[in-house]
Amino acid sequence: MWLASCQSDTNHSGPVDIDSAALNAISAESIIEHVKVLSSDDFLGRKPFSRGDTLTVEYIEQQFKMLGLEPGNGDSYFQEVPMAEVVSSPNEHLTFQMPNGELTINYLDDYVIGSRHLAPEIQVPETEVVFAGFGIVAPEYDWNDYADLDVEGKTVIVMVNDPGFYDKSLFKGDTMTYYGRWTYKFEEAARQGATGVLIIHETDAASYGWNVVRSGWSGPQLYLEAADNNLSRAPFEGWITSEVADKLLASAGGKDNLVAQALTPGFKPIGLGVKTSVSIKNAYRSSTSNNVIATIKGSKRPDEYIIYTAHWDHLGVGEPVDGDSIYNGAIDNAVGVAALFELAKAFKASPVAPERSIVFLAVTAEEEGLLGSAYYADNPLYPLNKTAANINIDALNPIGATSDFSVVGLGQSEMDDYARAAAERQGRTIAPSGNPSAGGFFRSDHFNFAKVGVPALYGGGGSQVVGQDSTVLAERRARLGGRYHHVSDEFDDAWELSGILNDIRVFFDVGYTLSMEKTFPKWKAGSEFKEIGENR
């Protein structure tokens, strides 16, 4: 037996015994087997609405059944998620009427654009372009980038991230708030009534290169179905490169000058003297994808739940790179789905069953904007006020064992304390994620649970790799680098799974410990989710 003693500062019920048989049920060989299947070319990049969607959800259902898990939605392992697939085809060139001539830019190389409207054609004959700072309205920070702007008929250009990225005294400094996420920028522009919104891409501020934007926007886009056919959204949304922004903003003092103004209290939107017209043809269809859900019923409190999540989808088939067009998504996130299977094996192998019910939820359309988890949060199969916590698994790193366990959004909730205790039982420390300015807390499926008040943990291996020859480690890092949203995200023999095994055992420890308790973890003071968590 491995004795797990809980932290006293979170009002836990007491020590919990975690049997070694449960931990040993988590197997590297099994993980590799599942990852090879899910990330094979046969699964076509696991794009929702594709043949890869059908193969993937059927495979997950089959594995849940083989593990002896009960269906999570009545007698079904599926929760249908109604979505609309939209293929937006803008003009190959977008022309801006500048104060001193014209600026013409190229689709995909310089800009991406689309429309959520379920309409065959979107025509904007003329729209004035306005620089609206960061596109943020945040009363708690006394911040309103849309102050005194009548945005009707206008297109706003906004910065990515939030002001704290540029001035550490603003917002939460290095730690991005939700106001910095691109999804928020589009939502706020729609609330303001904008005709269009274009985000300026900056690699450091976004934490990813233009290639990620380009590949993510170059094919069909999925959205949750809305009763109004998405007409409440701005007619068009998109991104422009930093180089294009330099030219568009030059006539109003230049980008650097405008960004400096946008960081000043009392900033007001700035007209650029620029106009453009936009034409988009949309092909669209409505269909459903599926979340796949299974449970282990709790022995004493079966009506209380701990939900493990991992997204099963990836980018499908896209632009060829060196002759390869399948975005296999091995790290992102076949390994997370494999981890769900290993966790289920561990719970089933434990001689003492969990007292709370354990839910395994493989969600769809994370890559399209966390859609599967958003649908579950809006349509929960288990009451949110009876859901103790969410533990999310996404893109575990096969670089090797680390002496630290990284928590994204460290400081948000008492889930940190459970993770710290579990990591310490492995002789590891806990650390914040390496780049809090990237807004990782808002970029995976746990965020939708946080938005409805459920304390959520999202973490994985840290940065301090142990027990590896420095030359071998450098070679492995080089070989595994650059795979995010790339066709090279495939399984290969450079993977070293010791760290992934340790991380999955941390996730098991946290969930099992929580399952034996009578209290729920709480949000910490200062978290933006504390109030909604207390009122759910």
Image (tube, rainbow, N blue to C red):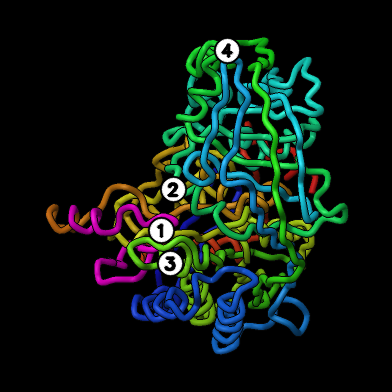
The magenta-colored residue range is 474-499
User: How many angstroms separate mark 2 from mark 3 (CA)?
Assistant: 14 Å
Dominant SS type (magenta): loop
Q: Which mark is residue 486?
A: 1
The secondary structure type at the circle numbered 3 is strand
The CA span between labels 2 and 1 is: 9 Å
Seen from the viewer's position, the closer of residues 205 and 528 is 205
Side of 416 relative to 292 (left or right): left
First along the sequence among labels 2 and 1? 2
Within 10 angstroms of label 3, few (less than 14), some, or many (20 or more) residues? some
Q: Nearer the viewer, residue 388 or 279?
A: 279
**Which label belongs to residue 252?**
4
- Residue 529 lies left or right of residue 261; in this view the side is right
Mark number displayed over residue 211: 2
Q: Residue at x 62, y 37 (%)?
A: 178
- Residue type at the position of mark 2: Asn
* Residue drawn 52% across the image and 27% down it: 245
Secondary structure category for the residue under label 1: loop
Residue 177 position within the rendered picture, expressed as x and y whole percent measured from the top left: 59, 34
Name the spot of residue 250 as percent of width and height, x first. 52, 16
Q: Earlier in the sequence, mark 3 or mark 1?
A: 3
Of marks 4 and 2, the one in the foreground: 4
Is label 4 in a helix, a strand or a loop? helix
Q: Earlier in the sequence, mark 4 or mark 2?
A: 2
Residue beneath label 3, please? 325
Q: Nearer the viewer, mark 1 or mark 4?
A: 4
Percent position of residue 237, x then y: 67, 41
